[in-house]
Image (tube, rainbow, N blue to C red):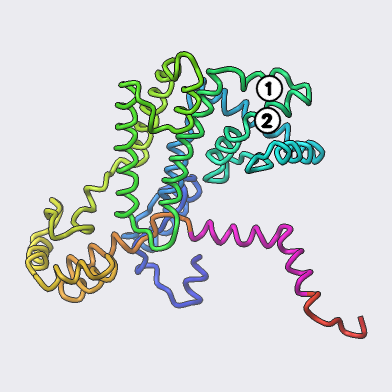
Amino acid sequence: MDNYFKEHGLKWENCVGFCSDGAQTMAGSRNGLQALIKRDAADAHWTHCVIHREALASRQLSPELNEVLTEVVSMVNFIKTQPLKVRLFSALCEEMGADHTSVLFHSEALWLSRGKVLSRVFELRAHIQIFLEEEHMFESASKFSDEQFLLKLAYLSDVFGKLNELNLQLQGKDKHLPHLADKITAFIRKLEVWGRCLDQQNIDVFENLSEVAETTESGATTVIPCINQHLSSLSGLFQKYFPNNSAQYAWVMDPFNAAAPADFRSAEEDQFIDMTSDSTLRLRFNAQTLSEFWFGVEREYPLIGQRAVCILLPFATSYLCEMGFSAVASLKTKYRSQLKLKLCNAKQAHCSH
């Protein structure tokens, strides 16, 4: 990185922030990348990728729920690891008119994997049960006749589906820390609402769980304590990984209705008052993107503008980097061989070859 900066005439002192995962080699304040960068850019601020933090916060499961996930992964592996079983299961799904004809592998490295695997297994639960019985895997097949197992599977597919929705909201280009902080704060508030609904025996927010509960005698009553414990743990972990809520960015997101932060210097507070009293800027705020607005403010009120830009400028996630890795990974798999074949077919071979 240092050589690249030198070759292209980039100066480390202009670096205001850098984003990475939380691995020690990247985030270490003594020997990691963070320490190396701060030697040349002392004011640079390290950001722990918001998506990685969301994945870490949602990873932990209670023993009861983890047992269900482990059983699901075991079933999926049994079907997916042998080509013959894959074909037989696909034929069974087609014969029974299923919307999908395969289950999905679980991978800890993929952000959305857990939610997709659980949702697909829940959708194809009847097909999987029949297939396992035909393969004489009666113990595994019997899980789908167990009300407790089905209720927990339904809940896991629901909650990880919601976590996947949050993950997708955090992905993409032009994502600023204030925007993503709002998404995380909203999700934490939802967790609290879901917990209160469960206390009142209301499970409407979890669609799959409600569907299964309607087919059981006791409903979801028996699993509500387990679910409540997981939601409470999930809320605590999100607050641990995201200790700073969106309130700290209120003055950037909506300067005309937010108070100046307490850590503003006198000169910054004076410029903030001047800026928020400017009716022309107020009209401009509603007509421009957040970035465009603050870049314009920086020209007129440099102190306050620069401070806002330093919050908006750093990457909040490593999404763009991960997207690049995905593109490279695709080129190194079957897609690359297909690409070569298409290019070769499109060109006439040289007569000497």
Task: Determine the main secondary structure of the stretch shown in magenta.
Answer: helix
Answer left or right for 62 relative to 295. right
Residue at x 56%, y 21% (from the top left corner): 149
Which type of secondary structure does the marked residue at label 1 adopt?
helix
Label count reads 2
Q: Which residues are magenta?
A: 320-343
Residue at x 38%, y 52% (from the top left corner): 47
The answer to whether residue 257 is above or below residue 199 is below
The answer to whether residue 245 is above or below residue 210 is below
Tell me the residue that label 2 is attached to: 128
- Give the percent coordinates (x, y) of residue 112: 53, 44
Answer left or right for 83 relative to 25. right
Quadrant of residue 99 within the rendered picture: top right
Answer left or right for 129 relative to 158. right
In which quadrant is the C terminus drawn?
bottom right
- Give the percent coordinates (x, y) of residue 342: 76, 71
Residue at x 16%, y 75% (from the top left corner): 300
Tell me the residue that label 1 is attached to: 141
The answer to whether residue 289 is above or below residue 137 is below
Q: Nearer the viewer, residue 233 or 211?
A: 211
Q: Nearer the viewer, residue 139 or 258?
A: 139
Mark 2 is on which residue type? Answer: Ile
Q: Earlier in the sequence, mark 2 or mark 1?
A: 2
- Give the percent coordinates (x, y) of residue 27: 44, 48
Which type of secondary structure does the marked residue at label 2 adopt?
helix
Do callouts 2 and 1 mark residues in contact (Cβ within 8 Å)?
yes
* Residue 340 part of the magenta-drawn span: yes
